[in-house]
Amino acid sequence: MSNRFFQGVVYQLRESIDKTVGVLDENGTVVACSELIKVGEKHEDVAIAVNSTFDVVKQDGYTYKPISPAPGYEYIAFVEGTDEITEKYISLVVIALTNVKQYYDEKYDKNNFIKNVILDNILPGDIYIKARELHFETEAYRVAILIRLSDKSDVSAFDILQSLFPDKQKDFIINVNETDIVLVKEVKDTNDNKDLEKLAKSIIDIINSELYIKAFIGIGTIVDNIRDLPRSFNDAQVALEVGKVFDTEKHIMTYDNLGIGRLIYQLPTSLCEMFLSEIFKKGSIESLDYETLFTIQKFFENNLNVSETSRKLFVHRNTLVYRLEKIRKLTGLDLRRFDHAIVFKVALMVKRYLVSNPTKF
Amino acid sequence: MSSLSLKGIYKRYPGGVVAVSDFNLEIEDKEFLVLVGPSGCGKSTTLRMIAGLEEITEGELYIGDKIVNDIAPKDRDIAMVFQNYALYPHMTVFDNMAFGLKLRKTPKDEIKRRVEEAAKILDISHLLDRKPKALSGGQRQRVALGRAIVREPKVFLLDEPLSNLDAKLRAQMRTELSKIHHNLETTFIYVTHDQTEAMTMATRIVVMKDGFIQQVDVPQALYNKPCNMFVAGFIGSPQMNFVDAEIVEKSGDLYLEFKGNSLKLPASKINDDVRSYIGKPVVFGVRPEHVHDEERYLEEMPDYVIDADVEVTELMGAETFLYLDVDGAKLTAKVAPTTTAKADERIKIAVSLEHIHLFDKETQKTIIN
């Protein structure tokens, strides 16, 4: 943030309260002060003290307070004096400086800019103008990673992610809503899905172990220009939705690896319903009980191998053959035949898609 | 009191995938329990159900005497360490370990006390001012452990925490983890696919496959008395040799016949169960260390000597592995490094039948150990 904004405000405050007022950065360096001579002075011990309390610290005749109370603050305000009235002054100073910072962030902040880009809140033509204003590299490899928390948490996942990706020039953490956070990350052109999945895994692990909540991650496609970032974000959203329907046991979904699920997700529901009624002419898919569906699932998992499936199900081979015959009579599909099996597999997926009714992006 | 009890636990996903089936286990206080099995066997899912990060579809989970199925993970008094431990890059080791406590507004003095205590246990007190990039892989792993230790939980859940380390560091950290467990006197539940980790650290091992518990026992018992072919093959490196065979009775004695060889079963390997397999196909298993090529064994066990072709030899330093072909049956032998056997040679080997295991070919269950 431009320190001149702070400097303008501390001059005005000095006139009102007649005390030295200033701002330290997170390393304890004075970045703005009503006494210009102090700018550049180091107060590392103050930064350490504030870092361990995140609250008011009184030291060497000054009162200090972080400009945002949560971990990850960027600035500390200070006022000369340690008495009770100074404590009130520092609170007012922090309110004033927080507002200035917020105004600055909204106008000049890169994070805010990226947020507007991925949410399509900025005209395509304005993207480049704004990017130039912010000295923002428009052509770089970036990817949007959508992190969805299963629950709200007392502790901010946003703070944790910002601490995990502290490079504010290359990585951007954006709160989309109460449970969704987007990480827009600059990546190397050599990065592939495997690297991104590893990164996603470490994000999930840290959310699990720090917040004790479940998280799901959708990885978008890597794009090479800022104007394509909304597409990457959209892909990340699609990946999460498709995963929610077809890969319920997975926590990380990559848009590039959605397979047949992506195809089905694109289909209109009326077409899906037509397909199901066409396939199950002889009897509805609902007529199959849980045990039968579980048998089918295992049969598919074991590559239509009757002996292997019966071993896995702890049933006699003939029992399995009997069950497959029953399915054939009910549906007209003989799952031992590859073409029938594939039709059934797709039909099951279509059914799941219709039941879960995912959001379309 | 940090004992755990898992009763009839199932995990079924909406798509029909069953990750864990009928999981019953009592975990004692201060135990170092290792869940081991191939990938996809349900061990991580089980751990995540204990943590509360996966809902339990069916069954009951107790921590102490309290049922915790519906208790939020943060209220279960557990701490987790995962494989992909990420440290906060711009924070010092102290801050990395303190971060979770700060977020929970733990008092400053308490944070300092806990971090310093954990650092002492982990032997990283001298690294507290360093940033992650100045640490080695092993040191980073200790910091990740430290983040869990400062929470002072009743139960530690560790999901393949050593997988990202190289082989040498992994071996070092195995010893370190055992020491840490001993010092903390807390329950550890540890997931790995590496049987060596399981054997070296566990007080008890749970072997899993396809979502089912195969066997639960202390490491030595698992090694010596596996309950089926899967456990026998999974535990031990190089893995147990398996050979299709038939039990045949000749003038009152029982013989193991395979690939044209006939070896008389010793009395210790004969009981009523074994007798019921006369004339039936079985699989016999023998560990590589019980296949010998040294002269003294050949002399000691003349009845168990057979011919084998050496395909490959691997000198490991303290021992040599011989990969053998016995008329089509593949055997691995772990012999002394002084062996003179060379590839493409035909040698005599002694199979110590006192140490074999017999398995039902159909069910793969153990007939005799």
Image: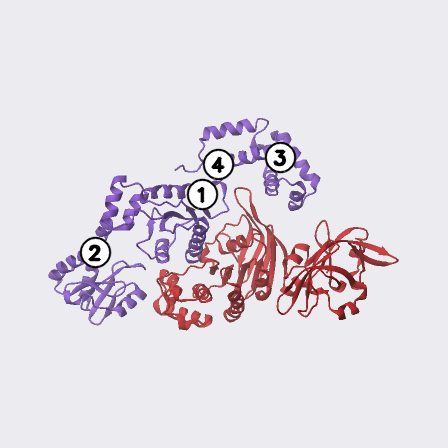
Chain colours: A purple, B red
Query: Which mark lies nearer to you, 3 or 4?
Result: 3
Q: In this view, does A227 lie above or below B1?
A: above
N-terminal label among 2 and 4 = 2
> Where residue A65 sits in the image (x, y, percent)?
24, 63
How many marks can you see? 4
Q: Say what secondary structure mark 2 lies in.
A: loop
Question: Does label 4 lie on the same chain as label 1?
Answer: yes
Report the front residue among B41 and A258. Answer: A258
Identity, as a three-letter code, of the amino acid under mark 4: Tyr
How far is disc 2 from disc 3 in space, using C-alphas?
Answer: 68 Å
N-terminal label among 1 and 4 = 1
Q: Are marks 3 and 1 in contact (CB under 8 Å)?
A: no
> Where residue B217 sits in the image (x, y, percent)?
63, 62
Question: Does label 3 lie on the same chain as label 2?
Answer: yes
Q: Can residue A74 be seen in this view?
A: yes
The residue under label 2 is: A2
- Which label number is shown at residue A353? 4
Identity, as a three-letter code, of the amino acid under mark 2: Ser
Quadrant where the image shows the C terminus of chain B: bottom right
Classify 10 Å Cα crowding around label 3: few (below 14), some (14-19), many (20 and above).
many
The residue under label 3 is: A335
Q: Say what secondary structure mark 3 lies in.
A: loop
Q: Which residue occupies 23% across, 44% down?
A: A129
Give me the chain letter of mark 1.
A
Q: Say what secondary structure mark 4 lies in.
A: helix
Identity, as a three-letter code, of the amino acid under mark 3: Leu
Q: Do the residues labelled 2 and 3 touch (CB within 8 Å)?
A: no
The residue under label 1 is: A256
Identity, as a three-letter code, of the amino acid under mark 1: Asp
How far is disc 2 from disc 1 in space, using C-alphas?
Answer: 40 Å
Q: In this view, does B23 lie to the left or right of A237?
A: right
